[in-house]
Structure formats: structure tokens, C-alpha cells
Amino acid sequence: MARYAGAKCRLCRREKMKLFLKGERCYTDKCAVERRQYPPGQHGQGRGKFSPYGEQLREKQKVKRIYGVLEKQFRTYFHKAAQKKGVTGENLIAMLESRMDNMVYRLGFAPSRTQARQLIRHGHFLVNERKVNIPSYLLSPNDTVTLREKSRKIGHIKESLEIAKQRGIPSWLELETEQFRGKVLALPKRDEITMPMNEQLIVELYSK
């Protein structure tokens, strides 16, 4: 499967904000956005304002990069969100949030969505007691995500869980640390997503 393999810090700098793509590094003074608050490239410091289309495109790119989704899959999510009842933009964000790699990250089993994808592909997790190794698998309310017994001694997973306990788990999830198990209580409401995203710009872009 195709996947962006370049420098992740360049993506954050391009969007001029932290996308939290590198785990703990994003919380330190080594973060590239903290050190160089301008887009990468030869003309990075000379870029001015965007046109309306440019703003829509940048918003779409930002959301794609936050969730680690490429264009074809992202467009598929949008079309599915448009077919569902409710507000298309909010449906889109809820669908992206329900991806298994995002849920594993939100529960604190991994410090970033990239590492969550790797752990899932290697078969470390069960969903409702069944092995799932597809990062894009969509979870529903009342689904449980459990770390497999043989994976519970992995050092960086235990470290990530300890940090997650200190920072807190989103209100729509429940984490049982001793059992290495998390539960989806509900899909998040739009006002519960704290990352600055304007999904209406994405709807406008794809509706042209």
C-alpha cells in the first residue's frame, strides 16, 4: 500500500502547525514547528496569502496528514460521509476518528498514528476478541480494543500508556490499563475534537 515516506516534520511545517506525527518529539523543543515557523523549501519564507481555492486545498491536505490518509481513500471517505444523514463535514471527521489506527493512538497504546498503524499491521490488537490487522478498520460504539497477551511486555507500549494516563483519554473512550483494553463509548461529537480543522472548506472543495 502506498504511504508517505518523507520527513514528517516537513508536513507540520507546511501546515504551520503541529500535527503530532512524531509522538513525544512534538511535545519537546526539538519540534521543527517550534524551531522554524515557516513552510519548508526555497521559497518557504516568501509565501503569502492563499486564494479561496488554496485555503480549501490546504485544509484538505492538513486533515489528510493528521489522519495519515492518502487522496483516493480520503475521497472515498468524503463520498460516504456525503451519503449519510447529517452534516457532511462532521460525518467525515467522525469517520476518520473511528479508524482503528486513530483509536489505538487515542487510547494511548501508541504515541502517534504512524506507530499505531505499524502495531496493528503486526497483529498486536484484538477487536471484540478477534484479531484485526487493518489500520483503516472502522470501529463502532461498544467495540473493544485489546492488546494481545503476548504483546503486553513491549516496553514502548507500556511507556506510551503511562504517558496517556497522565495526559488523559478522550471522553468518548474508556481505558482499562490493567487489562490493556479500551472501549469505544461513542463516536466523538464535532466539538470534542480539539485539533483546529475547518471541515466546511473540504466540503466546498469537493463540491465544485
Image (cartoon, grey):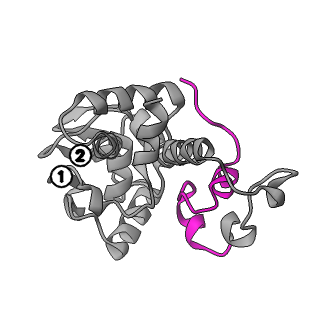
Q: Amino acid at mark 1?
A: Lys
Q: 78 and 156: which one is in front?
A: 78
| Image mark for residue 137 | none
**138 versus 111 height, above or below:** above
- Return the residue found at the far right: 42
**48 versus 63 height, above or below:** below
Q: 100 and 189: which one is in front?
A: 189
Can residue 174 be seen here? The reply is: no
The image quarter in which residue 85 lies: top left
**202 versus 50 height, above or below:** above
Of callouts 1 and 2, the N-terminal one: 2
Q: Is residue 2 magenta?
A: yes
Residue 20 is situated, as x and y percent measured from the top left of the image, at: 53, 59
Is disc 1 placed on a helix, strand or loop? strand
CA separation in Å, label 1 and label 2: 6 Å
Q: Are marks 1 and 2 in contact (CB under 8 Å)?
A: yes
The residues colored magenta run 1-29
**14 versus 131 height, above or below:** below
Q: Is residue 164 left or right of residue 33?
A: left
Residue receiving disc 1: 183
The image quarter in which residue 74 lies: top left
Is disc 2 placed on a helix, strand or loop? strand
The residue drawn where x is 46% and y is 58% is 111
**Mark 1 neighbour class, 10 Å CA radius: few under 14, some 14 to 19, many 20 or more:** many
Residue 68 is situated, as x and y percent measured from the top left of the image, at: 50, 41
- Return the residue found at the far left: 142
Q: 80 and 140: which one is in front?
A: 80
| Image mark for residue 145 | 2
Can residue 67 be seen here? The reply is: yes
